[in-house]
């Protein structure tokens, strides 16, 4: 289950094409935190923290499937058969998840209320711990803020993490999260410029393009998952 290079490209493009969504959802946070300083180092520190969060989540999720397969094989029995069913059992729901969020971005389905509630819950839950970094140096404070706010869920990040589960290992999962995060950087770093205004103005197009990428990846994941049965 080696993640081909094309999937890394897809993850980067998903982040890049989702610029309109990222600017609309994360833009206020960028203005509220690193944007207040007016310094580029604050933005760099903030986004470094966010990249670390995406990478760690991807590594954790990516390492789960090989661990489950290893544990199933170590218990004896039909290890190959168990591996096939585990791969399909994990990959197929992840593919469905990717498809659903792709259809939401395209506009065919409505975004579920629980996703918005989850984002609000994460932000309010981490607001108190963030106060402990107030006395820390400015770079550490911005890094910690980006790290914490990287946990705020959205359709794009959830789709990426679903892909990380089937990536084939912790390294591939971590790279999946990191490459997606790098794709989101240009738009968020250009906040307040004409490029950012262009992204906001064309957010609908951005959503459609990122949704198409998610749907295509979801279909690809589903085909691979069903292929485990035919193998």
Image (cartoon, grey):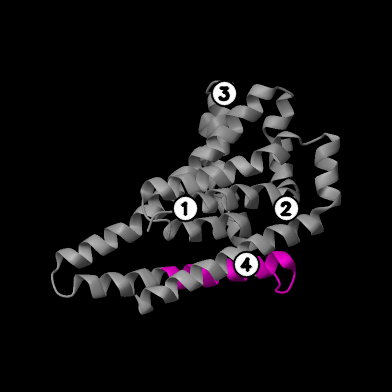
Closest to the camera, between mark 1 and mark 3, is 1
Distance from disc 2 to disc 1, alpha carbons, whole Å, reads 26 Å
First to last magenta residue range: 91-111
Disc 2 crowd rating (10 Å Cα; few below 14, some 14-19, many 20+) is many
Q: Secondary structure at mark 3?
A: helix
Disc 1 crowd rating (10 Å Cα; few below 14, some 14-19, many 20+) is few
Q: Secondary structure at mark 4?
A: helix
Which residue carries the number 1 mark?
4
Query: Where does the N terminus fall, quadrant-wise?
Result: bottom left
Distance from disc 2 to disc 3, alpha carbons, whole Å, reads 27 Å
Is 99 a magenta residue?
Answer: yes
Which residue carries the number 3 mark?
139
Distance from disc 4 to disc 1, alpha carbons, whole Å, reads 18 Å
Residue at coordinates 28% horizontally, 58% vertically from top-left?
A: 67
Q: Which mark is residue 215?
A: 4
Instruction: Name the residue at the bottom extreme.
Output: 230
Residue at coordinates 56% horizontally, 28% vertically from top-left?
A: 141
**Among the two numbered marks 1 and 3 on one chain, the one whose residue lies closer to the N terminus:** 1
Closest to the camera, between mark 2 and mark 4, is 4
Q: Which mark is residue 115?
A: none
Residue 158 horizontal/vertical position (percent): 55, 59
The answer to whether one can see residue 152 in this image is no
**Among the two numbered marks 3 and 4 on one chain, the one whose residue lies closer to the N terminus:** 3
Query: Where does the C terminus fall, quadrant-wise?
Result: bottom left
Q: Secondary structure at mark 1?
A: loop
Which residue carries the number 2 mark?
21
Distance from disc 3 to disc 4, alpha carbons, whole Å, reads 38 Å
**Among the two numbered marks 2 and 3 on one chain, the one whose residue lies closer to the N terminus:** 2
**Among the two numbered marks 2 and 4 on one chain, the one whose residue lies closer to the N terminus:** 2
Q: Secondary structure at mark 2?
A: helix
């Amino acid at each position: 289950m080696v993640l081909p290079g094309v999937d890394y490209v897809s993850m980067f493009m998903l982040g890049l094409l989702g610029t309109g969504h990222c600017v609309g959802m994360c833009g206020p946070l960028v203005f509220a935190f690193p944007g207040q300083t007016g310094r580029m180092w604050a933005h760099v520190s903030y986004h470094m923290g966010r990249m670390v969060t995406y990478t760690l989540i991807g590594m954790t999720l990516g390492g789960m499937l090989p661990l489950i397969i290893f544990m199933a094989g170590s218990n004896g029995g039909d290890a190959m058969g168990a591996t096939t069913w585990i791969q399909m059992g994990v990959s197929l729901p992840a593919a469905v998840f990717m498809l659903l969020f792709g259809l939401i971005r395209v506009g065919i389905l409505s975004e579920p209320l629980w996703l918005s509630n989850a984002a609000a819950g994460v932000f309010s839950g981490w607001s108190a711990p963030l106060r402990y970094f107030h006395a820390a140096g400015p770079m550490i404070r911005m890094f910690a803020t980006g790290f914490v706010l990287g946990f705020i869920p959205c359709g794009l990040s959830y789709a990426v993490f679903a892909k990380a589960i089937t990536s084939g290992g912790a390294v591939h999962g971590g790279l999946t999260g990191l490459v997606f995060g790098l794709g989101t950087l240009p738009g968020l770093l250009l906040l307040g410029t004409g490029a950012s205004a262009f992204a906001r103005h064309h957010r609908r197009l951005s959503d459609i393009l990122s949704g198409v990428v998610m749907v295509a990846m979801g279909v690809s994941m589903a085909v691979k998952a069903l292929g485990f049965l035919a193998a």
